[in-house]
Image: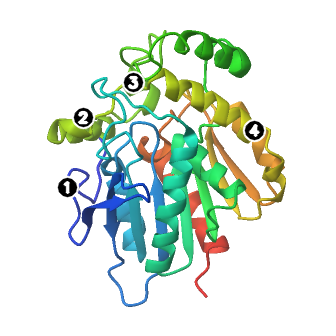
Amino acid sequence: MSVSPYDRRAIPLGANIHRWSAPDGWELRAFAWPAATATPRGSILFQGGRGDIFEKYLEVFHHWHDQGWTITSFDWRGQGGSGRLTEAANCGHIENFGQFVSDLRAFYAQWVSATPGPHVAMGHSMGGHILLRALTEGVVAPDAAVLIAPMLGVKGPLGQAMGERLAKLMGGVGDSSRPAWKGNEKPYTTETRANLLTHDRARYEDELFWQQTNPGNVTGPPSWRWVIEAFKSMRELRNSPRLKTMKVPVLMLIADADGLVEPRSALQIAPKLPDARVVRFGKEAAHEVLREVDAVRNRAIGEIDLFLAARAQKS
């Protein structure tokens, strides 16, 4: 069992959970934890993946907060505590990934003006995809960025091009806001959700605790429209010529044995970025690197801390 100096199942003292209104009036559930020092180290905006809630990352938030960082996060539109965009139970739906980017752009603008620098943006999985897309589109410009197991391709037997064609074929019939599958993190697999995410059972059970505490925040399978738009957005991002002109320094943590996202896609994108460092993990790491067993998690956090010390220095 993981031993942590922090309570992973309690909102920390001094943190605030509130509602933030996007420009179109949609309310997103947000987390804000100001630095507990008169001279803050800076500010981190951390964004999780598909179906995530920010409570899953309280342990790592504690780590950075102890170093003097202000920590901020929000649940993506249509998932977690930020409402649903379809009547299909807890299905995670989006009409266009551009909506995610627009929310990040507006939230980021307010966050930068209200928090101390340097400013660091981090994204896990789908959050890493949306963050990199926002960086290449120039709608966010932090001092440094960290992408953790970024969703730049998805793992599957058919490959990216065939997977996209199949999604369009199957999702294009009927209501595309319906769930693409019934359960688990990906269809047609015998792997359990726990094994796909982390080897650390205690940290996986933390997520179950939060699901039981706030059942309304649980997000189930994606809609077919989400799947179709994810393939489209990933393809366009992988082929974007703006990757080569995106100057924000990036640290990319990649799990080679990831069963959800395709690590090869990230490894193909990294050399295109002008200022990127790649850290790879082997079979010891599943998808949620920051919620893995201590040896993996500590290495990942150590790499991030070294990167921030070098590339997000306080002026």
From the image, tell me which residue sits under label 3: 221
Which residue is most to the front?
Answer: 24
Q: Nearer the viewer, residue 237 or 43?
A: 237
From the image, tell me which residue sits under label 1: 10
What is the image's colouring? rainbow
Where is residue 223 shown, x and y percent of the image? 44, 24
- Looking at the image, can residue 160 be seen? yes
Element type at mark 4: helix
| Drawn side of residue 148 relative to residue 239, left or right | left
Instruction: Give the residue displayed 57% in from the left and 60% down from the top.
Output: 304
Residue 208's disc is 2
Residue 238's disc is 4
Residue type (three-letter) at the residue carrying disc 3? Pro
Q: How many marks?
A: 4
Residue type (three-letter) at the residue carrying disc 4? Arg
Where is residue 55 shown, x and y percent of the image? 30, 50
Q: CA distance from mark 3 to mark 2?
A: 16 Å
The earlier-in-sequence mark between 2 and 1 is: 1
Looking at the image, do the residues carrying marks 1 and 4 touch, with CB atoms under 8 Å apart? no
Looking at the image, do the residues carrying marks 4 and 3 touch, with CB atoms under 8 Å apart? no
Q: CA distance from mark 2 to mark 4?
A: 34 Å
Where is residue 152 shown, x and y percent of the image? 65, 37
The earlier-in-sequence mark between 4 and 3 is: 3
Q: Nearer the viewer, residue 132 or 223?
A: 223
Q: Residues within 10 Å of mark 3 (few under 14, many from 20)?
A: many
| In the depicted structure, whether residue 154 falls above or below residue 48 | above
Of circles 3 and 2, which is in front?
A: 3
